[in-house]
Image: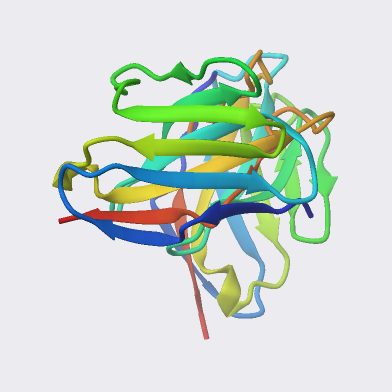
Amino acid sequence: GAVVSQHPSWVICKSGTSVKIECRSLDFQATTMFWYRQFPKQSLMLMATSNEGSKATYEQGVEKDKFLINHASLTLSTLTVTSAHPEDSSFYICSARGIGSPAGELFFGEGSRLTVL
Amino acid sequence: DAKTTQPPSMDCAEGRAANLPCNHSTISGNEYVYWYRQIHSQGPQYIIHGLKNNETNEMASLIITEDRKSSTLILPHATLRDTAVYYCIVNSGGSNYKLTFGKGTLLTVNP
């Protein structure tokens, strides 16, 4: 099956710093990528939808200036958590839909665990 | 997209079939039923999807009732590695194919 890779898989940073998480589709081109966040013992919460070459669409309540998303190519999307605070500590997961894939069939990355001290 | 209801948890003996129910009584005609699972601390994994007819692949079978108001995911021979949270999602495949995850069912396969 299609592979989506995230990097880093885990990161620890100090409060106030920025962290960038990469999401790559390794063997297919992804026109649309989605970023989710998951807190412990909770379900995934969609943060934003990213289309290649255009601005991301953020879900209600997600600060676009804090969570910067860039989808510069058909195989790479990045999420930058700016001025991170301890409450931003979470499991961040990206997913991608390939060109021509059935609607709703998404491939997910392994997730990136962010811990802000 | 229509809302789904799943039991919070289920247990299954290793080697037996696991039948996971999902209620989606408000599903509309153009909405598909998708199943994903998430093993602890990993990203979700696509399992199967269907519209009206029953579907089967190498991982599971999906049985959708004739009125499409409910469905059952069947893992024919559950293994310990099938222990995960299983999500039933209804999606119309709209412009951005967004998937909204509910709380899912924690399936625990016991030896």
Specify whether B57 is left or right of A67: right
Instruction: Tell me if residue B39 comes above or below residue A16 in the rendering.
Output: below
Specify whether B21 is left or right of A69: right
The type of colouring in the image is: rainbow
Residue B106 drawn at (x, y percent) = 44, 58
Residue A69 drawn at (x, y percent) = 46, 29
Can the viewer see residue B72?
Answer: yes
Residue A11 drawn at (x, y percent) = 34, 59
The number of discs equals 0
Residue shown at the point (49%, 31%) measured from the top left: B4
Residue shown at the point (52%, 86%) measured from the top left: B111
Can the viewer see residue A43?
Answer: no
> In the rendered image, which quarter is residue B58 located in?
bottom right
Taking the view exactly as shown, the residue that stands out farthest to the bottom is: B111
Residue A43 drawn at (x, y percent) = 38, 44
Instruction: Tell me if residue B97 comes above or below residue B64 in the rendering.
Output: above
Specify whether B89 is left or right of B64: left
User: The N terminus of chain B is located in which quarter?
Assistant: top right
> In the rendered image, which quarter is residue B55 located in?
top right
Residue shown at the point (59%, 41%) measured from the top left: A95
Specify whether A104 is left or right of B54: left
**In the image shown, does B99 or B75 lie closer to the viewer?**
B99
Residue shown at the point (41%, 44%) measured from the top left: A20
Instruction: Tell me if residue B52 comes above or below residue A113 in the rendering.
Output: above
**In the image shown, does A3 or B80 lie closer to the viewer?**
A3
> In the rendered image, which quarter is residue A19 located in?
top left
